[in-house]
Image (tube, rainbow, N blue to C red):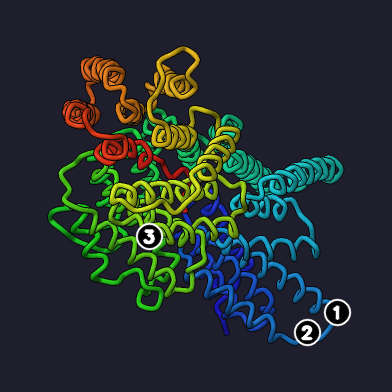
Amino acid sequence: MATPSSTSPVDLETTSELAFKSIQQGEFENAENLFVKILDMLSQAPETPPFKILQIRLEIASVRLSGRKYKESEEDIKAIQKDIDEIEPINDADKALKAELDLDCHLRLANHMLATTQWKEASDEYRRLLQLKPSSTLHRDIALAYAQMGQCDLAKEHIATAWSELHSSVDNSSARDSEAPNSSTECQCRQAGQGLEHYRMKSIEATINMLSGDYQAALEAFSEALDFMRETLGPNHYLAIDAKCQLGSAHLANGDYRTSVTILEDAISQTKSINAGYYYELTRAYLSYGKVDKACYLAAMIAMALGGLTQTRPYHRDIMQDLRRRGGLRHDQSPLGFYMNYDLISTMRLLANIEVHMHNTWYPLPDLSVGQETLEFLRKDLAASGHGMSIASATVRYDLGRLLLASPRNLLWALPKIEEVARDRATLLGDSHLDTLCARRELAKARFLLDIHNMERGEAKQFDWDELKSTSENIRSSIESKCGPQHPESLTSRLWCLTQAVLTQEKIGTKPGDTLMSEIQSANQLLSDPKLVSERLVESISMKISLCGLVAGSENSYLAEEYLDAVEKQIKEAREETSDTWICGELEKRAAVIDEFRSAISATSQLNRVERSGVLVQARISAHHLQIETRRM
């Protein structure tokens, strides 16, 4: 017979309260241990209904999901679903309990799919659940799934419905309390739950705005979510810190690199535990802002921690090679499973992209073989794990295609890879999604540069340049309408359109009415905006250097010299004003580039247009590798 303490209702209630309080505080490991204790207590009591046991097991699966134990959570949910299916109800009450538990189990499965970026599968499951039992949380979560797939209009409809139902629910609860007041503990728990629900709703609304390209609305919503969490739970609550990191990521997506770094550094200084996702976002912010060496070091340290490596020299190339040799990402070999390695996959992608960035910004890297091999490794691993058509796979293949574009000799190999990514992204995310538009821009670029490369070798071009130019202009227009003209993706698209124009026009006119000259001046003005320069100093200077390459490539060497003088002056002033050694190092590299560029302009002054374009192609393309990944995998 079980001891009274092991099955006491008081003990169960107390432990249950502690478990739910642990969840509210973000202490998921402790919550899991408490629920396991409750399960043991209930299992010792022979009178415990099987449905109660299954309910606690679902709570364990849910808290493991919150603690990022993705594989364990998935296995738990599937095992519970199997047990539910095998139960034979003996009366109508049991039938109702089984149906309720079955819905709850499918909800946890949908939540798992959402947390592991299986957007399509999650949306299908949520849609089925909505037909059976509509709720604000279902509308909220399906809204996020739709937004991640690029169906932002549908997402906005569902989040509006979710807000309406949440407000109705709060009003009904207040009315019930006034008629028949409950215990203070119960009211407090419900109010805390409503507060968390308000935060989650506001956070998802902000994410939808960000994914739809309405960055200003996203920033406002994330700021509101952060203020709400600070006021209700305090500034050091894990959700307040999470809201701050989301705000930092939103600023990064908006191109506010400096602000993003400041916010993310502050948020991480408040965390009690290591969160790889936070450090990943900070690494991306460092890379975007120009702190390349710091980004490289931090990404290497994250990869070592996630991959279980111990190295005396955390050099990013050594780490990428060691991780590939271990084969630690394979779904069938890792005890952690594919999803637990998700942050590691993202970090290895980031390491490879840092390598591309370093190569393209004139660091002393002899080649891109290590980054290329790493992305190929990830591509094959994702395919072997059954995730070959996932958004993660499309992102890895997109990075691989862009890496290959950095070298003319790889253009022919890059083209089919980018074609595949553009097609897959359109299928996965929709035609109007920013990721799809960027992939199509890179596809137009690959086709155009392949023709240039062939012409340099005396071969005929393969593609219709007028059609490629029209496609690029349409993409630029679509991205600018989504993100605004100063967004990094908008400027990248603008510079690419200018590159095409220069390559198909003998010379840039200097008269006031010259369209191409006006476009170049307009781009230069955008890149000179004080706020943009403050947030993206290094990137804006690199893009300006690329503009100099475009001008020089069109037989306007004197005008290119004028632009270079202006950029050189800007670099000198920035170096005098900043005390940041990381930024100063990057500015010195840009200054060295300008010196090399002057020599290139002088050496190519007597060449014909196609020959000159070949010599200056690195300078023209340098702006395009600066495209920043604005969304997490």
Identity of the residue drawn at 33% across and 43% down: 283
Front residue of 581/6: it is 581
- Which residue bears the numbered disc 3? 345
Mark 3 is on which residue type?
A: Ile
> For the residue labelled by badge 1, is the local secondary structure a helix, a strand or a loop?
helix
Identity of the residue drawn at 54% across and 67% down: 60
Residue 370 in sight from this viewpoint: yes
Front residue of 236/220: it is 220
Labels 1, 3: front one: 3
Residue 603 got which mark? none
- Which residue bears the numbered disc 2? 89
**Vertical arrangement, residue 53 with respect to residue 438, above or below:** below
Where on the picture, by quarter, is residue 319? Answer: bottom left
Q: Marks 2 and 1, Cα distance to the nearest angstrom?
A: 8 Å
> For the residue labelled by badge 2, is the local secondary structure a helix, a strand or a loop?
loop
- Which residue bears the numbered disc 1? 92
